[in-house]
Amino acid sequence: MRASVRALPLLLAVLLLPPLSPMGASDSLEVRSYVDCYIASWEPDTPHASSEILKVSRTTVDNDTVESRALLRFDLGELRSYIPQYSKIINATLVLTTYNTSGPTIEVWDIRGDPDLFGTTWNSERSGVPWDNPGGDLIEKWGEGTGSSPKAEIDMTSYVQAAVDNELESNGWLLIKIAEGQEGYYEFYSEVSGSNGPFLVIEYEAASLGIVLEAPEVVVTQGENITMSVYVTGHLSKAINLSLEGPDFLSYEFSPDQGFPPFNSTLSLEVPDTAPGGSYTVVIRATGVMEASAPVNLTILERRGFSVVGPSHVELVGGLEENISLKVVPTGNFSGEVSAGVLGSPDWLNVSLSPQSGSPPFNVTVSLMSLHGVEASGTLSLVFTGARNRVYEINVTTRVRRVAVYSNEIDWNLSSGALISAANSSGVTLHRINSTDEFGDYDVVIVLGGHKAPTDSFMPSNIAASLLSSEEKASLMEGGQLVHVSEDEALVVIVAGSDRYKTSGLLQMDLNGNGIPLAQELMTGDPRGIRGA
């Protein structure tokens, strides 16, 4: 059955709920009964709570049937504390260590009520509370097997699965009896005997659910149909259903659309001729006792048009320019010119585009610079105009830059006043560091002094000696001044004169001719644009 989808505007991450065990791995558990007894029709009001041997029998004596049955109790709460609900039980076996047997068929039933062990008899569930049916009020048979020696092993997978899924009517009591129509006896050791007592051996795969996609990004042209594989991972005792959320114009079909994890499904998507071109997010969901989802980035190309491809999010540092590239690509047999412009922008953001027009395919460089003292986020909207208009939005965030100074004590004493004043007036917090290992923690690192600046405990190594070119070093030796910018983890700006006084004086100079001294430019401007850098 093909279905339509409803709109979902937000991108959702792949979700695994919850990853309780490694995918494909199974675990095992052994659970012992913690109380047991047997009851006998020939002693209908006598409890047998402390016997090391539990007796199960049926025989005919003088046309009367006499019978004994065994009661075992397992702690379902303990079981569920180890095995998460809806985990898949692979195998569960009840193991009874035989004392004596004639080899009959024995049956395992769960029973109503809450026997108190020391008051439980053939006639009574507990002291003063009779069974509705002498010998125990049976609910459902969960297993049967031969009362063999040295052990009887009975498949109880369905029972443990129901217990884990919290679907049992009983509270953990099991009754063992001879199969109807048979006579014989089976005697086995009780929990009082110690290690020979009854126990359940359980192998299971912990509950988990996830979705793995063949193609998390899909490009399709208007009017085309596509198929993709969807792999539902994990292990569950209950089936889950597959569905899809996305634009209203899409139609889809999963085959199959439900199953027990893990399983494969094929998703068929129909994109009509009238579907608007652009980028969309569709979300594949697995729902049931647990839920998982996975996004698919769907790009619909128009038969005659163009699309814009590029980043949807940019992080800026105040006053530092960032360039991003957008690609304008034709779809179908489109030809013609496309122009680009700014439709809307936050007031703290400066934007320029180059080039502002072209014939697809072509790239547009978007240069972004935010004001230096702003911590904010906003949306930049660009409009591309050709055969039709397209709006491309970019989420832009910006923060105040992190600035540090790396220098010896001599240069710091001469220059710190200008730098601290510039930092205070611009709202930037200025840090002094004494290790090149800290450079990556900052956006701009100001290094004072050239290749001859002496090292000390504040500047253990002379970074300028390795970053300056031979020409720059020669210029300093001849009495010059320079601003050198290197880009690595941070913008490293070397401010150096031929001596310490010229280094300090350089911070007071207006190198760009804009009336702003170098110290202030380092806090608010882009060092890469400083004249001489």
Image (cartoon, helix red, strand yellow):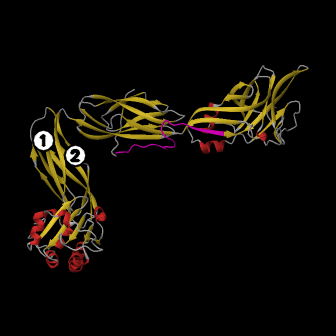
Q: Mark 1 or mark 2, which is nearer to you?
A: 2
Of the 4 image quadrants, the one containing the N terminus is: top left
Q: Secondary structure at mark 1?
A: loop
Reply above or below: 355 against 388: below
Pointer 1 residue: 386
Q: Amino acid at mark 1?
A: Gly
**Measured from the top left, where is residue 281 in percent x and y?**
32, 41
Q: Is residue 114 visible?
A: no
Residue 148 lies within the magenta run:
no
Q: Is residue 238 visible?
A: yes
* Quarter where residue 370 is shown: bottom left
The boundaries of the magenta stretch are 11-30
Using the image as rendered, state which of residue 478 and residue 81 is in the foreground: 478
Residue at 11% x, 51% y: name it: 354
Q: What is the crowding at mark 2: few (fewer than 14 residues within 10 Å), some, or many (at least 20)?
A: some
Q: Which mark identifies residue 310?
A: 2
| Left or right of residue 532: residue 54 | right
Tell which of 209 and 206 is nearer to you: 206
State whether the magenta stretch is mostly helix, strand or loop: loop
- State the image coordinates of residue 464 (x, y, percent, origin top left): 19, 67
Residue 166 on image: x %, y %: 61, 39
Residue occupying the point 88% across, 30% down = 42
Q: Amino acid at mark 2?
A: Gly
- 315 left or right, relative to 179: left
Tag 2 secondary structure: loop
The answer to whether mark 1 and mark 2 are in CB contact below 8 A is no
Q: How far apart, in angstroms, are the residues tagged by discs 1 and 2?
A: 18 Å
| Residue density around tag 1, few if under 14, some if 14–19, many if 20 or more, within 10 Å | many
